[in-house]
Image (cartoon, rainbow, N blue to C red):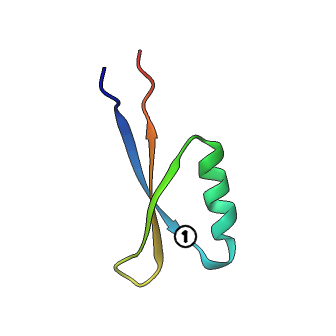
């Protein structure tokens, strides 16, 4: 059976970046990449596996 994933993009706020990533991690999301967004801020790309069933 092939794994299925869902994805999210999350804007990161400089002074609370760790808290944002910690919260998403607690919810089962894995950080894939952080890039500079179109307006100059940071954006995190997250993924988590979709449960079968």
Q: How many marks?
A: 1
Secondary structure, mark 1, is strand
Residue 37's image quarter? bottom left
- Eyeballing the image, is 2 above or below 38? above
| Residue lying furthest front | 1
Mark 1 Cα shell of 10 Å, populated few (<14), some (14-19), many (≥20): some
Measuring from the top left, give residue 43's x and y in whole percent. 45, 69
Measuring from the top left, give residue 52's x and y in whole percent. 41, 20
- Eyeballing the image, is 20 above or below 24? below
| Residue lying furthest bottom | 40
Q: Is residue 31 rendered to the left or right of residue 14?
A: left
Name the residue beneath numbered marker 1: 12
Image point (30%, 26%), residue name = 2
Image point (41%, 15%), residue name = 53
19 and 3: which is toward the camera: 3
* Viewport quadrant of the N terminus: top left
| Residue lying furthest top | 53
Measuring from the top left, give residue 17's x and y in whole percent. 63, 69
Image point (66%, 52%), residue name = 23
Measuring from the top left, give residue 12's x and y in whole percent. 54, 70
Image point (42%, 84%), residue name = 40
């Amino acid at each position: 059976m092939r794994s299925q994933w869902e994805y999210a993009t999350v804007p990161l706020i400089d002074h609370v970046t760790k808290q944002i990533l910690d919260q998403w991690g607690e919810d089962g999301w894995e950080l894939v990449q952080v890039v500079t967004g179109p307006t100059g801020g940071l954006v995190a790309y997250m993924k988590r596996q979709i449960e079968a069933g």
